[in-house]
Image: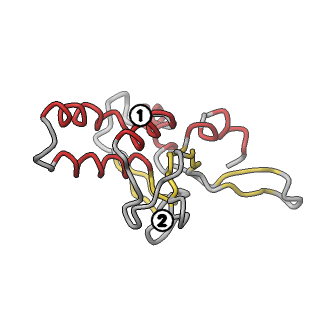
Amino acid sequence: ILYSPVRASGHVDRFDDFMLKDTQTGECFRADHLIENHLEKLLEIKEISDEKKLEMKRILPQIGNMNAAGLDQLVKQYHIKSPNTNNDLSEPIAFNLMFSTTIGATGQVKGYLRPEAAQGMFVNFKRLLEFNQGRLPFAAAQIGNAFRNEISPRSVSGVEYIIAL
């Protein structure tokens, strides 16, 4: 996908997650998942006051929408360390989830591999509705490849998706 449409859609600026790095080993962790896991473990500790537990329960659903400063505050407030080494963690760093590439013979045109598999289905929904004579379709499906630049990749970064509404 060319740079201009992806930039205009907001993906270049907003298709990212925050990561935390172990300051000694450089190991990366997805910030929201690490903080959520830590708070959930704290909730299981009986010695923690009900007031503190209530505060953590209030924070948990908001973590996914927090900015870097908010996440950093939680890391410091709850003394969150690297789960594997107990080392300190860096401040949250924005990590773009799209694979960038260059396009063309000169390599001067910037582009990205397809970041989401479902976009085409949503953009073309009007055509699907018209094809179904104005009635809401029972189901819609799309098959294709999508690529995500994961913070903690498991096995593969390019995945074939089957998406259905």
Residue at 66 percent across and 52 percent down: it is 112
The residue at the far left in this view is 46
Query: Given the image, on which type of amino acid does mark 2 rest?
Result: Pro
The residue at the far front in this view is 47
Image quarter in which the C terminus is found: top left
Residue 153's disc number: 2
Task: Check disc 2 and report its element: helix, strand or loop.
Answer: loop
Measured from the top left, where is residue 48 in percent x and y? Answer: 16, 42
Q: How is the image coloured?
A: secondary structure
- Few, some or many residues within 10 Å of mark 1 (<14, 14–19, 20+): few
The residue at the far bottom in this view is 155
- Reply above or below: 111 against 106: above
- Few, some or many residues within 10 Å of mark 2 (<14, 14–19, 20+): few
Whether tag 1 and tag 2 are in contact, CB under 8 A, the answer is no
Measured from the top left, where is residue 11 in percent x and y? Answer: 59, 40
Q: Quadrant of residue 71?
A: top left
Task: Check disc 1 and report its element: helix, strand or loop.
Answer: helix
The residue at the far top in this view is 134
Q: Label 1: which residue?
A: 65
The earlier-in-sequence mark between 1 and 2 is 1
Q: Is residue 35 left or right of residue 72?
A: left
Looking at this view, is 106 or 16 the one in front? 16
Query: Given the image, on which type of amino acid does mark 1 rest?
Result: Asn
Measured from the top left, where is residue 143 in percent x and y? Answer: 45, 57
Looking at this view, is 82 or 61 the one in front? 82
Q: Quadrant of residue 63?
A: top left
- Reply above or below: 8 against 152: above
Question: In whole angstroms, how far apart are the C-alphas of marks 1 and 2?
Answer: 22 Å
Residue at 40 percent across and 32 percent down: it is 129
